[in-house]
Image: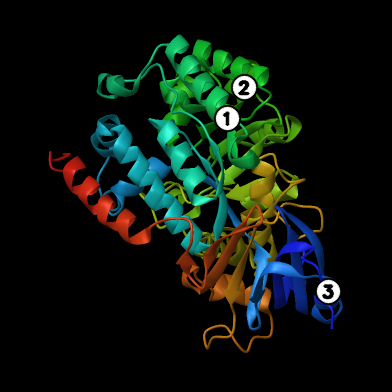
């Protein structure tokens, strides 16, 4: 028999596949060449047609699009366990002293640990909300093989306590532009650089306009923490006599390249504005639960694109499976049970927010977010042949009810295997764990009140 010539780089055989409309098909093969999905279909048909350098037998596994964390803080990985159950103001008492103390090496190790946790949790792409020394985060992302959107933490006003993190408008813009010039499109297009506003409480109108101009000029995205706290709403009402989204709209900075993180407390008029301007929204269920519950059913009903984020390890672990499960409970408790509507947040809607919704938030839904021929090969395999998963009447429901980060066995981003049988291939897990411990100890050797 004449051996077939290699016409693919990676073959995933015998898997169950989650389609873009959340149906399940069995005995499937995924064919990847270079960084793209070139064929999907029955194993019997495709295994005869393709031969690859690397073949994975995925019997007993589910292949689904990689999860997309649309709001995280990779530089806060060394804050794990430090914030929960703390009294206010966490921002000024813990976050600001922590972030302003970070050296380049701390951001590097924090970002590495964050990327490592994401790979092991089934996350293949993320949007970092913006921190310090972001070139270090960029390097960690390039090393990890993940896909990401990065920006700098941007603020020019606020109380005395945040002065270490404030910069002039020019400094803020030039720092972010430098990151853009250096890393936009790096890693064969895996890295994108956006601009950001830390929050409306810490940005002057002049800075907001300049950030928008810069993002526009670079034809890239812009993000901000929005409508997260009631005191932020009060601040806008007091200073501008408008609510946060109304205020940004009068500045002319809202469009389809704007991502509003959290967006918990939104008035009907703000929802109309977000809809009209085609903005994107990302909720962070666990982090948000301590502040309020967004009216997501209404946002979805209006056709506003919603995605999910973790808000970083300071608030919770980086598993989006956990976020989806918590969000389902939050939505049922807030908008289901009180109105006798048990199907207020179906499992497929949650999965869509964590995959395709994230792809839209990243402005890359034509490239990632679903498993379709022609798209980039970003997907994960889940070991579904386990007693907490099988047998099931509905695997899509079980994904939300019972699957956790630990069930993810393989991760593929841009056609490259990042994790195989839970072994991360791109990063030195043992060294990162060791170095993170030392970095955390040294950062907190001076007590943060
Ligand atoms: Zn955040």
- For residue 46, the mark is 3
**Is there a contact, CB below 8 Å, between mark 3 and mark 1?**
no
**Residue holding disc 2:** 215
Left or right: where does residue 412 sit relative to residue 159?
A: right
Q: Residues within 10 Å of mark 1 (few under 14, many from 20)?
A: many
Q: Say what secondary structure mark 1 lies in.
A: loop
Residue 149 percent coordinates (x, y): 56, 38
Examine the rendering and report whether any part of residue 344 can be seen.
no
Whether the residue under disc 2 has CB within 8 Å of ligand 1:
no
Q: CA distance from mark 3 to mark 1?
A: 40 Å
According to the picture, the residue beneath numbered tag 1 turns out to be 194
The reply to whether the C-beta atoms of the residues labelled 2 and 1 are less than 8 Å apart is: yes
Residue that lies at the very extreme toward the front in this rendered image: 2
Point out residue 257 in the picture as x, y percentages from the top left corner: 67, 31
Left or right of 326? Residue 40 is right
The residue positioned 68% from the left and 58% from the top of the image is 352
Q: Earlier in the sequence, mark 3 or mark 1?
A: 3
The residue that appears at 28% across and 54% down in the rendered structure is 81
Residue 54 image-quadrant placement = bottom right
Crowd tier of the residue under label 2, counting other residues whose Cα lies within 10 Å: few below 14, some 14–19, many 20 or above = many
Q: Secondary structure at mark 3?
A: helix
Instruction: State which quarter of the image contains the C terminus.
Output: top left
> The N terminus lies in which quarter of the figure?
bottom right
Q: Quadrant of residue 160?
A: top left
User: What is the CA distance from the residue labelled 2 to the residue labelled 3?
Assistant: 44 Å
Q: Earlier in the sequence, mark 2 or mark 1?
A: 1
Residue sitting nearer the eye, 398 or 117: 117
Q: Nearer the viewer, mark 3 or mark 1?
A: 3
- Relative to 122, does residue 422 appear above or below in the rendering? below
C-alpha span from label 2 to label 1: 7 Å
């Amino acid at each position: 028999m004449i051996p077939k010539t290699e016409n693919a780089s990676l073959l995933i055989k015998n898997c169950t596949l989650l389609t873009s409309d959340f149906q399940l098909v069995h005995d499937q093969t995924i064919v990847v060449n270079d960084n793209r999905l070139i064929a999907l279909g029955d194993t019997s048909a495709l295994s005869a047609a393709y031969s690859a350098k690397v073949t994975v037998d995925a019997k007993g596994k589910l292949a689904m699009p990689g999860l997309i964390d649309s709001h995280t803080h990779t530089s806060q990985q060394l804050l794990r366990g430090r914030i929960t159950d703390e009294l206010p103001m966490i921002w000024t008492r813990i976050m600001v002293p922590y972030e302003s103390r970070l050296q380049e090496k701390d951001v590097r190790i924090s970002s590495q640990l964050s990327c490592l946790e994401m790979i092991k949790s089934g996350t293949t792409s993320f949007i970092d909300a913006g921190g310090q020394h972001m070139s270090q985060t960029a390097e960690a992302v390039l090393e990890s093989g993940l896909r990401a959107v990065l920006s700098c933490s941007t603020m020019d006003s606020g109380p005395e306590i945040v002065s270490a993190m404030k910069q002039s408008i020019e400094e803020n813009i030039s720092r972010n532009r430098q990151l853009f010039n250096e890393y936009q499109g790096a890693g064969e297009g895996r890295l994108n650089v956006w601009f950001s506003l830390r929050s409306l409480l810490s940005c002057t109108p002049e800075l907001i306009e300049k950030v928008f101009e810069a993002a526009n000029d670079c034809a890239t995205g812009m993000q901000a923490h929005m409508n997260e706290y009631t005191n932020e709403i009060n601040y806008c009402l007091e200073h501008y006599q408008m609510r946060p989204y109304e205020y940004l709209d009068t500045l002319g900075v809202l469009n389809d390249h704007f991502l509003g993180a959290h967006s918990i407390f939104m008035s009907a008029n703000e929802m109309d504005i977000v809809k009209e301007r085609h903005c994107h929204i990302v909720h962070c269920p666990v982090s948000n639960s301590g502040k309020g519950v967004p009216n997501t059913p209404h946002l979805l009903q209006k056709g506003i694109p919603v995605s999910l984020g973790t808000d970083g390890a300071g608030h919770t672990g980086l598993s989006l499976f956990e976020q989806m499960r918590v969000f389902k409970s939050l939505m049922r408790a807030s908008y289901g049970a009180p109105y006798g509507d048990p199907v207020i947040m179906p499992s497929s809607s949650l999965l869509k927010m964590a995959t395709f919704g994230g792809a839209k938030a990243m402005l890359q839904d034509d490239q990632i977010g679903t498993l379709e021929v022609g798209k980039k090969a970003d997907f994960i395999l889940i070991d579904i042949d386990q007693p907490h998963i099988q047998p099931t009447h509905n695997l899509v429901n079980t994904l939300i009810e019972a699957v956790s980060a630990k069930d993810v066995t393989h991760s593929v981003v841009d056609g490259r295997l990042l994790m195989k049988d839970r072994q991360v291939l791109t990063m030195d897990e043992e060294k990162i764990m060791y170095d993170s411990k030392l970095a955390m100890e040294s950062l907190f050797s001076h007590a943060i009140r």
